Amino acid sequence: MSRLVPRIVKGFKDAPAASLHARRRMIETVRGVYESFGFEALETPAVEYVETLGKFLPESDQPDAGIFALQDGDEQWIALRYDLTAPLSRYVAQNIATLPLPFRRYQTGSVFRNEKPGPGRFREFTQFDVDTVGSASMVADAENCAVLARSLEALGLGGQVRIAVNNRKILDGVLERAGIAQGTLEAVTTLRAIDKFDKFGPEGVKLLLTTGRKDESGDFTKGAGLDAKAADTILAFMAAGQASRLATCDALGDAVRGSARGEEGVAELREIADLLSAMNLADETVAFDPAIVRGLGYYTGPVLEAQVTFEIKDEDGRTRQFGSVAGGGRYDGLVGRFLDRELPATGVSIGVDRLLSALDAAGRLDTGAAQGPVLVVVFDRAQMAEYVRIAEELRAANIPAEIFLGTGGMKPQLKYADRKGSPVAIIAGGDEFAAGTVSIKNLVLGAQVAATATTNEDFKAEAKAKAQVTVARSQMAATVRTMLADIAT
């Protein structure tokens, strides 16, 4: 038989224990913030009917290429979820008769994109969402800002994050003022140019709005083809960002004056500004930014991004800001696709892997391995039932315990304990079984003694005196618990 070659599917990755521990601790921190606002947990399947995903409806006989899709036995197109929002919309519509509205939920899980993978870009990644469905109140949108700000602060990124907020209604108003029809290629290209303001500045954006822009490599990006007057209207809007939220609202009001939809968007931002002040969120933490567009077409009102502001080196050694780790906004039309009426909704999504990378870059990632189980060292395999009893006594006392099931004597077993992060080992052989005792070895203290002992004799004497005790079997669990408490402190 030919041997199989072990290989992982392109664009996917394995997650070893250390990274999973760091992710779990991060998620638990964020979960605590979400629950403090009254959000409750929900899980939806990783697979949905294609029409549920909305953005990827079949054009002919198969869905668009952006998703992983297949036909089931009933010849129905099903797909791995592209995000967590579309499944939430399906869930709410399907259970609308019994759900309390507003429905406030959080969910974490893998999402899948059938896109070209690259450095740091995977086809499976984890999102952590929070959403409010069934409320048009701007309080829900202000709370989107608050849960992100408080989550990132709880993770140690306070002062290193800027939550930037805009409103799609204001963007619609600016397009109207510039004479650009909604939904046209001209409108899409203009919004893409606005989204590049932080990267290219006013001169670069003006080129993207008009004739086009050539980058340093010589690649040319076709412009929106606007005339000078329309481009100046857009650039005047882009200059509306001010140091304070209320000053930005005043400037935005001037930029969209005469557009009913734009003025409605400014009024919503003014209301959010008052709410953010009531939440004690400073202008430096949550700012109103005309450059925030958000790519998904279903956003209908306030939109936001959480941007990490410290600088890093990119793959080419150039200095740049880390960038966005979360985003979202109001999507009042999405749930209504399943109903005979519109149901307002708003939410935000944290990119879990992206945030973990930011925490790592900031030196805030909790990389400490989780404490391993107590290891029961095996000397006499004829006594395996007795070793099982020792492990069961520890587990009955709520102490995780593992019996060594490999081969070798004391040295390989203690090496295994070190790899597992075991803080304590239970040692018992024929003499201990006969006497009804066990030896309990404090592996953490033993390592500390080994690091400070000057001679091998010193180490053996001090280790025996401090790091290992022999107790009656009846006292084993209590002694281990005390030892673990000492190690923790």
Image: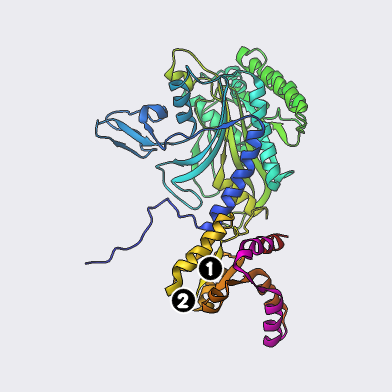
In this picture, is 50 found above or below 256? below
- Magenta stretch secondary structure, dominant: helix
Q: Quadrant of residue 470?
A: bottom right
Disc 2 is placed on an element classified as: loop
**Which residue lies at the image location 67% right of the left edge and 22% below the top edge?**
139
x%, y% of residue 201? Answer: 65, 38
Residue 376 got which mark?
1
Quickly name the residue at label 2: 380
In this picture, is 431 found above or below 301? below
In this picture, is 132 found above or below 25? above
Q: Residue furthest front?
A: 435
214 or 92: nearer the viewer: 92
**Given the image, on which type of amino acid does mark 1 rest?**
Val
Q: Is residue 474 magenta?
A: yes
**Which residue lies at the image location 70% right of the left edge and 76% below the top edge?**
449
**Given the image, on which type of amino acid does mark 2 rest?**
Asp
- Image check: 481 left or right of 101? right
Q: Quadrant of the C terminus?
A: bottom right
Q: Quadrant of the N terminus?
A: bottom left
**Residue 202 in view in this figure:** no
